[in-house]
């Protein structure tokens, strides 16, 4: 016991202390978040958006396959009929109400997998901030990408 | 009379302000040092270099909800943190940070009380603080806290002995328990440049003292009473808000006191060239405070039986041997020189 004590205090302890001290001279690896940001992996899946066709019509046809595929039950879709006066998508129907609950969502990407028209896709914006829970229900107008001629186009 | 009282009040105020600021910034130093050792930055958002962090933390703790467990023994629950802190603050009363100075024609000693058994008094107060921990652990009626408190008791019994014995060597050399005398006995130099510090005469004693001091203030690697991994937070699991802050303060102030005692006993107290005594003293204390943090960042926590084994089977025999050898040397010196 005594022998081990001396071994520990005289050899192991200084060694350990030197190791930790050596580390304190290294440059910290912390990413100073709001000022610095990590580069995301090429296939990172974050905030969703709803895409449009090149002619500006919405891709979503309100089929609710995404909602069915979602393991977290985060999507709510309500379909509406396109009419000659108000046409939103090429087919018969379009997504009238489209909501994603970002608190429920687990960013698995199943919705984008399930969608027959590749309307819903996951982008690279990952900063979800709100003061209340209702702020995390992303509605259709928040998710829908701007029309092709809009200068705000090209997110995610 | 009035003047003496005034001096005492001023000294009390100075010690309180000094220790509480010391505590606040010690938490900052600790977080910074541990962070750098872990290759992080540590607090750096509140104020320059995160220097306002302790203020923010203090305010946060003050305004937190004060929760008391329904099963708790109310009186003891409230008293426990107060006992811890009071004992910690009182221990500092005899720490002497410099030689007596002449202020407005009066001799003023740089400690609150110039007790001739000062060192003994510090040790006594250090063990008083344990009552706070034990009572705190017991009164919350929570098995984790209770175990933490019991461990603290067992730990203090096993380490206090060696702690006391480890400084007997110094006491044999100086023949006094008064911090002032002990420091003065370390004045001057050997061969003109080696300071006559007791660390060179009592290396074993100093090493034992420092190990036991770490155990006595419940710091890593001897922080068994808190042992987050198995006891949640040990004796203060059920304490929140300002009551938790009191325990927290007591721990850090004990650290400061133990560092100050180490400096007084083994490292020549306030003595040093050029700089004023109080500054020398503070610098030396800072070095030991840094060591406390450094140790914490380096060593894992001891297993409980190892801790006890170390205390009884290693430190105690070594401390006894040290006392024996020192006593022999002192007697021989008196007989033959
Ligand atoms: S990413 Fe997954 S969890 Fe999120 S909405 Fe799509 S399917 Fe649901
Ligand atoms: S996003 Fe795709 S899957 Fe979901 S309702 Fe629209 S078209 Fe159907």
Image (cartoon, coloured by chain):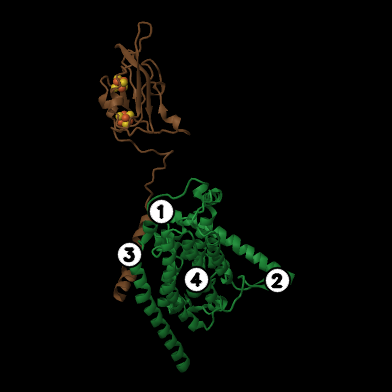
Cβ–Cβ under 8 Å for marks 1 and 4:
no
Ligand 1 visible in quadrant: top left
Outermost residue on the right side: it is B2
Q: Nearer the viewer, mark 3 or mark 2?
A: 2
- Residue appearing at x 47%, y 47% in the figure: B44
Q: Looking at the rendering, which quadrant does residue A116 occupy?
A: top left
Residue at numbered disc 4: B127
Which image quadrant: the C terminus of chain A? Answer: top left
Mark 1 against mark 4, which lies toward the viewer? 4
- Badge 3 marks a residue whose secondary structure is helix
Label 2: few (<14), some or many (≥20) within 10 Å? few
**What hue represents chain A?**
brown
Q: Are marks 3 and 1 in contact (CB under 8 Å)?
A: no
The answer to whether the residue labelled 2 contacts the one labelled 4, judged by CB atoms less than 8 Å apart, is no
Q: Specify the quadrant that holds the N terminus of chain A.
A: bottom left
Q: Mark 1 and mark 2: span between their CA atoms? A: 46 Å
**Which residue is the site of mark 2?**
B4
Q: Residues within 10 Å of mark 4 (few under 14, many from 20)?
A: many
Quarter assignment of residue B203: bottom left
Q: CA distance from mark 3 to mark 4?
A: 32 Å
């Amino acid at each position: 016991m005594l022998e081990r004590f001396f071994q520990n205090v005289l050899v192991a302890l200084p060694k350990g202390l030197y190791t930790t001290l050596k580390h304190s001279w290294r440059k910290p690896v912390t990413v100073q978040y709001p000022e610095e940001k990590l580069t995301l992996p090429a296939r990172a899946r974050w905030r969703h958006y709803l895409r449009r066709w090149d002619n500006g019509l919405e891709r979503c046809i309100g089929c609710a396959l995404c909602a069915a595929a979602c393991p977290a039950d985060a999507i709510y879709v309500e379909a509406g009929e396109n009419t000659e006066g108000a046409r939103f998508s090429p087919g018969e129907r379009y997504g009238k109400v489209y909501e994603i609950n970002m608190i429920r969502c687990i960013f698995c990407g199943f919705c984008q997998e399930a969608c027959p028209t590749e309307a819903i896709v996951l982008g690279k914006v990952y900063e979800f901030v709100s003061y209340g829970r209702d702020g995390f229900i992303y509605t259709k107008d928040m998710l829908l990408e701007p029309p092709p001629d809009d200068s705000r186009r090209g997110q995610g | 009379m009035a003047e003496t009282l005034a001096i005492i009040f001023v000294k009390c105020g100075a010690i309180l302000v000094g220790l509480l600021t010391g505590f606040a910034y010690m938490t900052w130093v600790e977080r910074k040092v541990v962070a750098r050792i872990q290759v992080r930055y540590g607090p750096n958002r509140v104020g320059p270099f995160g220097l306002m962090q302790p203020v923010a933390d203090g305010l946060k703790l003050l305004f937190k909800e004060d929760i008391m467990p329904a099963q708790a023994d109310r009186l003891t629950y409230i008293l426990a943190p107060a006992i811890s802190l009071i004992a910690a603050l009182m221990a500092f009363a005899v720490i002497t940070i410099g030689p007596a100075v002449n202020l407005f024609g009066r001799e003023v000693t740089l400690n609150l009380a110039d007790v001739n058994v000062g060192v003994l008094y510090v040790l006594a107060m250090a063990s008083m603080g344990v009552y706070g921990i034990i009572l705190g652990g017991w009164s919350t009626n929570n098995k984790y806290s209770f175990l933490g408190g019991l461990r603290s008791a067992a730990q203090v019994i096993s380490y206090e002995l060696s702690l006391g014995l480890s400084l007997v060597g110094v006491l044999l050399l100086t023949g006094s328990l008064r911090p002032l005398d002990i420091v003065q006995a370390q004045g001057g130099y050997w061969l003109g440049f080696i300071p006559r510090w007791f660390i060179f005469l009592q290396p074993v004693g100093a090493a034992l003292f420092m190990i036991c001091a770490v155990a006595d203030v419940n710091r890593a690697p001897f922080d068994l009473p808190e042992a987050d991994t198995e006891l949640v937070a040990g004796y203060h699991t059920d304490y929140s808000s300002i009551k938790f802050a009191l325990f927290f303060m007591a721990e850090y102030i004990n650290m400061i006191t133990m560092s100050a005692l180490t400096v007084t006993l083994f490292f020549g107290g306030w003595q040093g060239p050029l700089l004023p005594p109080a500054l020398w003293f503070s610098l030396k204390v800072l070095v030991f405070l840094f060591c406390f943090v450094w140790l914490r960042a380096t060593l894992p926590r001891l297993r409980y039986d190892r801790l006890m084994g170390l205390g009884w089977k290693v430190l105690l025999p070594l401390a006894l041997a040290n006392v024996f050898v020192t006593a022999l040397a002192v007697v021989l010196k008196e007989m033959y020189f």
